[in-house]
Amino acid sequence: MSPLLEARGLTTVFETRAGLLPAVRDVSFTVAAGEIVGLVGESGSGKSVTGFSLLGLIDPPGRIAAGSVRLDGEELIGLEQGRLRALRGRSIAMVFQDPSTTLNPLLTIGAQMRLALEAHGGRDASAMRARAIETLSQVGIADPAARLGAYPHQFSGGMRQRVAIAIALLNRPKLIVCDEPTTALDVSIQAQILSEMRDLARNIGTAMIWISHDLAVVSSIASRILVMYAGRVLETGPTRDVLSAPRHPYTQGLLDSLPAHATPGTALRQIPGSTPSLVDIGPGCAFAPRCARASEACASDPAESVAGNRRWRCHHPIAAVA
Amino acid sequence: MTGEAPLSAFWLEFRRNRVALAALGVVATVLLVALLAPLIAPQDPYDLSRLRLTDARRPPGFIGSGGYVHWLGTDAQGRDLLSAILYGLRISIQMGLIAGAIAFTIGATLGAFAAFRGGWVEALIMRVVDLQLSFPAILLALVLAALLGQGKWQLIAALVAAQYAYFARTAHGAASAERAKDYVEAALSTPLPTPRVVMRHILPNCLPPLIVVATVQVANSIALEATLSFLGLGLPVSEPSLGMLIANGFQFMLSGRYWISIYPGLALIILIVAINLVGDQIRDQLNPRLRR
Amino acid sequence: MSELVRLEKVSRRFAQPAGLTRRLAVAAGLSQPPSVVRAVSDVDLTIRAGEALGLVGESGCGKSTLGRIIAGILPPSEGRAMLDGARVMGEGRRPVKTTTRVQMIFQDPFASLDPRWKIGAAISEGPIAHGLVAPSEARAFVVGWLQAVGLPPDVADRYPHQFSGGQRQRVAIARALAMKPDVLVCDEPVASLDVSIQAQIINLFLTLRRELDLTLLFISHDLGVVRHVCDRIAIMYLGRIVEMGPTQVVMSAPLHPYARALLDSIPRLALEGDEAAFRPIAGELPSPLAPPPGCHFHVRCRRAAESCIRQSPLLTPRGPSRSVACHFPIEE
Amino acid sequence: MPGYALQRLAQAIIVMMVISVMVFAGVHAVGNPIDVLISPDATQAIREQAIRAYGLDQPLWRQYLDFLGRLARGDFGRSFLYNMPVLDLIASRLPATLELTLAAVIGATALGVPLGIYAGYRPSSILSRAIMAASILGFSVPTFWIGLVLIFVFAVNLGWLPAGGRGATVSVLGVEWSFLTLDGLRHLLLPALNLSLFKFAMMVRLARAGTRELMLTDTIKFARAAGESEWTILSRHVLRLIAIPIVTVFGLEFGSTLAFAVVTETIFSWPGVGKLIIDSISSLDRPVMVAYLMLVALLFIVINLLVDLAYAALDPRLRAQHA
């Protein structure tokens, strides 16, 4: 069975005055129908840009420089704008980080949902209304019919994010890209949305790409995980395997940096240095300057190694646990 | 990011916009020319004894009784227009700068004071400022010019009254915004005395938006002064500013002697456009919402 | 250990600023008075010398306000904030901070440094103004502090925009510590940093605390970080402290239903194959403008009974080191 | 909401009172009108008679109270210069000014907003650069000079359009209007164009700046991600979102356009209140000045009120606040 989404060698660059900024470099991955894939990385890792690239939503001075993204067998890169627009929202939708800035403050929830439906051929007012009510109740909004006439400011942050998710769900997309959708929310609300999204994906069979900087959040929702650093995917595999026995030293370093599993009061095993500026990235492994295992070999780009359903890019991977 | 101070980084970015850079060059040139007018103008246009009525209203290129070419023609009194424009620029710029500087000082002080005093004092000051802002500057200047009579300082007073409110509003907004920032809280919680925090931290950070307003307002005062002079409420006739030159030429326009009005106008426009272009670039560079 | 910081019945209200005519209208009874938020209400709290106290809670719970009251940035509307027996801020209509012994570190290191000051000058400004160091010796003084926070000495001549987030936070720490404080109030000091940088800054806190014998008030929404850094923890909900006690004990066996729910709702790394790595709390966070009567948590609480609506529970001691504000605490 | 409306009304009355004091005090300080009214050769008796006739012998506060009382009765006094009731004088001139101002503001908005949105939507296209260059010029070039150039080019050189006056008018409801006749329209075109250029530049800049900032926001990205077309995004989201600042400026600029009409009316000999006020300032026609300033102040308050109402209609967040 061919995957729902297949990205091959995706490369997105930004032309800045400081030089060409490779935000996403040669990223390849697949998403199967109904699967939740986690995309984890720190700031500047290119995880969000990867998400926007999938929908062709890269504004100048950025552009997709190379690669292929096939959704349901159809190539998205270089697709004519009208066709791409027809796919957005219908085949592939997106939810953003901050729900207070994504919804239009001047339009009612109902009007915004209607615009999203009309964008994909919605004509019949009562059918559109029924669909809007259906999706609002799917995301756990009480009394959805009455809430259609409400404005975004009349909702709390968590409720606003639910509305945004409902808008993404309206046209029954096969894949939703979720860009840090719970980062701006309080932990108790984050927990509610995480568990609702997990159930939704299971019930209606929508695939998701869940982008987050928080390993714990991703591990609680995604079955497979991609760890990104400086525009590259360094390691991928089933979430539990990657997190319990990472092969890439960076993944290990991230896990060691979390205080949750360390003895309180003891020094954490920190990764030295800071994330590299994308302008200065050379040909070799971008993590090498911060890596305890680095050697001269790391001056050259490591090829991707494959073992079963796991992949990594490292000259000196951590040995697999027997 | 290289190792520059914020100011030199700003200049590096400014330099990249060639239009703005050229505009800055024009502003500098005009300033220089106006400053040196007595040295480079072919004639002293205010010396009435030197004017010959036989030279009056001559087209550009005419060689008058002085024996030199009137490149831009002559006006109704027989003044060499080029000289009159250079001297006029001098007056216009002088008025714009003086009025701008006074309005800046009064407005910024008032706005910053309101932001720090808070309470009903702030509410009252800002209410008055808002009210005045909604009232057209030209009308205010007209009435004041009429009230105070003609003269340089009266005109400056009218210009200041029409413009201080912009500075007050901007200073109030900037100071309120800066005051709420963490670095101010950090300085106050050190603790450092409030006046020191205001003078050394907050005010320097309020300057950029005020500078934008200042460039625009200097351009506006120059235009406003010209308009008032045109309406006959400006400077005395003996030392014509650009607006007065244009006004004097108006009556000859219908008979086709365009140069008397058009050339002083062009000089005025080149100056104002250049200042506004510079101001626009500074504004764009300072707008955080356009940065990524 | 002796008691260093003491809050007595501290409350803090914020009112929306009202315009002139609005005030007149209110006075004439034509208009509603502007709404008032009780960000912090009736908080009693002590921090012992050398202790690290964690203050946790969700947005709007008042933890940052409480931190600012202790740091002498905000005066309390009622009650007193004391440091070593003396008020942190003076009295009167516009009180000012009177001590240098408590300093603060802010969440966003991009906003907490003046963009126009070189960081060397930023670090030495306070100490010079308070006579802690002579201007002629400022250079060496700054270099010493830069090294203490793990920055090379030559960065003293750079501007904040030339640093990464983690480095700026180091600068902010150096600036606060250069005032030689006894108490350091840290408001979400690692929340805006990347995970790998977070670990560096947490390690720096641990080291500095030991070396300088600092007392810490560590405000955070991240329970993992608090568990790692703090000896004692106080959990806030809508302006009140609902539970307080030794970090390990509270986090393994909370007494307050909100504390329990908060701990449960944080996702854990799913290493053990446990899919339900978290359990959400039902319901929305109420608006701090109009908190529910009685115990603010009763609307979301499974244990709530009638008395919880009528009467708000006081923070009462449970055993030697713990206290809880609940009519029906969880018994283990 | 009724509380808010009362509050606004109280505010308006206070403002009007303050302005009336300022206007009265200000205008009183302008020279001595008797010098203008009476020939310098007039006898002392005639002078004193005139002073009494105009109430100029009373103490200031007395004059002010009289003035307020007359205002309340709608009596603004008689023009010294035209020797007719000021209210009638202004009423006869006002339609011409309103016509000119409305034509200028509406034209500037109708043209400036779409062009500004385009320039913000495609900031680097050649057309956008041309639009911005035009707006910089419109923003910088003083109105009076543009007026001269327009007359020189279209009236003197090309001879296409008249250089001044109002042309033929049609009377509707007892008021004369130019825009209803072809000749009137020909006369209206140049002054309206002259007056509108600055507003046009302002609208372009405002719409462009708003659009440029909006296009980078998540609101627009989210709409795109939902598959909405660029036309929907511009017409349903961007236009709504930039409407608030535009309505503000539309309101405020209507007032300032009214004021700038002074300049345009002078250049094009347009018989409106602008020309009247200039004449009354130079001849110290006090009642006309007072009435004109009070009228402008009243207009401002009304416009501000309308702008606020428009806000509430446009922005649901404000409706909630005032409820």
Image (tube, rainbow, N blue to C red):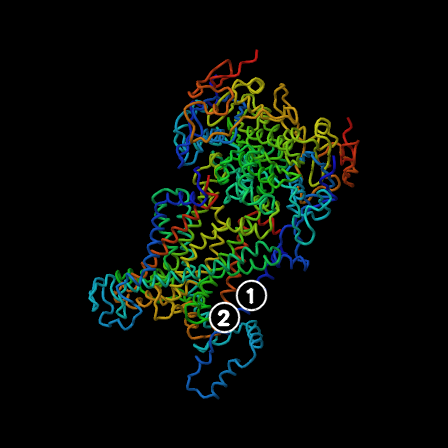
How far apart are the alpha carbons under marks 1 and 2? 13 Å
Residue D16: mark in rendering: 1
Q: Give the residue furthest to the top.
A: A322
Identify the subunit bearing mark 2: D
1 and 2 marks in contact (CB < 8 Å): no
Q: Quadrant of residue D81?
A: bottom left
Q: Report the side of C16 relative to D105 (left or right).
A: right
Q: Depth check: give the residue in front, C119 or C269.
A: C119
Q: Residue C212: image x %, image y %? A: 64, 34
**Category of crowding for the residue at label 2, using alpha-carbon neighbours closer than 10 angstroms: few (below 14), some (14–19), many (at least 20):** many
Up/down of A123 relative to B37, above or below:
above
Q: Residue B117: image x %, image y %? A: 60, 56
How many numbered marks, from 0 up? 2
Q: Quadrant of residue C229?
A: top right
Q: Quadrant of residue A98?
A: top right
Up/down of D271 relative to B281, above or below:
below
Q: Depth check: give the residue in front, A173 or A312.
A: A312
Q: Amino acid at mark 1?
A: Met
Q: Residue D65: in sight, yes or no?
A: yes
Q: Amino acid at mark 2?
A: Ala
- Quarter of the image with the C terminus of chain C is top right
Q: Residue B230: image x %, image y %? A: 37, 66
Q: Residue D168: in sight, yes or no?
A: no
Identify the subunit bearing mark 1: D
Could you tell which of marks 1 and 2 lies nearer the N-terminus? 1
Which residue is found at the position 71% from the left and 37% from the top? C47
**Category of crowding for the residue at label 1, using alpha-carbon neighbours closer than 10 angstroms: few (below 14), some (14–19), many (at least 20):** some
| Residue identifier under label 2 | D291
